[in-house]
Image: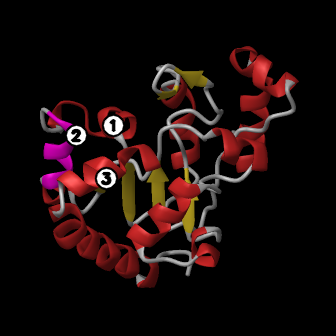
Amino acid sequence: MNNIETIKQAIMTDPENAGFTAKGWQPLIQVAPAAKILIISQAPGRVAQAANKSFDDASGNRLRDWMGVTRDQFYNDQVAIMPIDFYYPGKGKSGDLPPRKDFAAKWHQPLLDLMPNIQLTILVGQYAIKTYLGKSRQKTLTATVQHYQDYLPAYFPLVHPSPLNYGWQKRNPWFETAVIPVLQAKVADALQRSTTSD
């Protein structure tokens, strides 16, 4: 599997994804060889899946604000989006269901191999953080985000920008004053940096 479309077709024909393909859903990813920033998120929300566009919802608006990028910058080939699961998992008792456990292990690496120019990987939410930081993460999500500098330059862990987490932000004002400015600086630097394909 040496190109994005081949991998995408393999995902859609995988028996584990047959139910989603039967609904007419496509795997929700935004991947390009020229990408300099990679966003690893949880899974598409209902609105984003229906629109067939990653983060095309309130969470996306907030994430773009945090990153300091425009909508046009977010949806071009400089920014890749690769959730832990590429399909909306459905509704649970207190929000969306979690992404499937084995999906990322099966499909992330073939796509990562096609993106040699990634300068910064933003880990959005607990599932992305757990998958990519493993035992190096702190005991809580809050502590991991607070100690974001421990994971640079490769990873920048963030709380999920969902409206469900607005309360978390109010309880942790340091996030907006101390973390967001650094995130915006790192994003700007990554986008401006020259790479092998520039």
- Residue 158 percent coordinates (x, y): 31, 52
Query: How far apart in space, not on screen, are marks 1 and 3 (Cα)?
Result: 8 Å
Disc 2 residue type (three-letter): Leu
Q: Is residue 101 visible?
A: yes
The one nearer the camera, 137 or 94, is 94
Left or right side of 144 for 180: right
Left or right side of 18 for 87: left
Q: Is residue 117 visible?
A: no
SS for callout 1: helix
Tell me the quarter of the image containing the N terminus: top right
The residue located at (56%, 53%) in the rendering is 81
| Label annotation for residue 158 | 3
| Label annotation for residue 141 | 2
Which residues are drawn in magenta?
140-146
Quarter of image, res 55: bottom right
- Residue 3 percent coordinates (x, y): 71, 49
Query: How far apart in space, not on screen, are marks 3 and 2 (Cα)?
Result: 8 Å
Query: How far apart in space, not on screen, are marks 2 and 1 (Cα)?
Result: 6 Å
Tell me which secondary structure the magenta stretch mostly adopts.
Answer: helix
Disc 1 residue type (three-letter): Gln
Disc 3 residue type (three-letter): Leu
SS for callout 3: strand
Q: Disc 1 marks which residue?
A: 126
The residue located at (39%, 39%) in the rendering is 128
- Residue 84 percent coordinates (x, y): 50, 35
| Label annotation for residue 184 | none
Q: Are marks 2 and 1 in contact (CB under 8 Å)?
A: yes
Among numbered discs 2 and 1, the one appearing first in the sequence: 1
SS for callout 2: helix
Quarter of image, res 33: bottom right
The one nearer the camera, 91 or 37, is 91
The residue located at (39%, 66%) in the rendering is 119
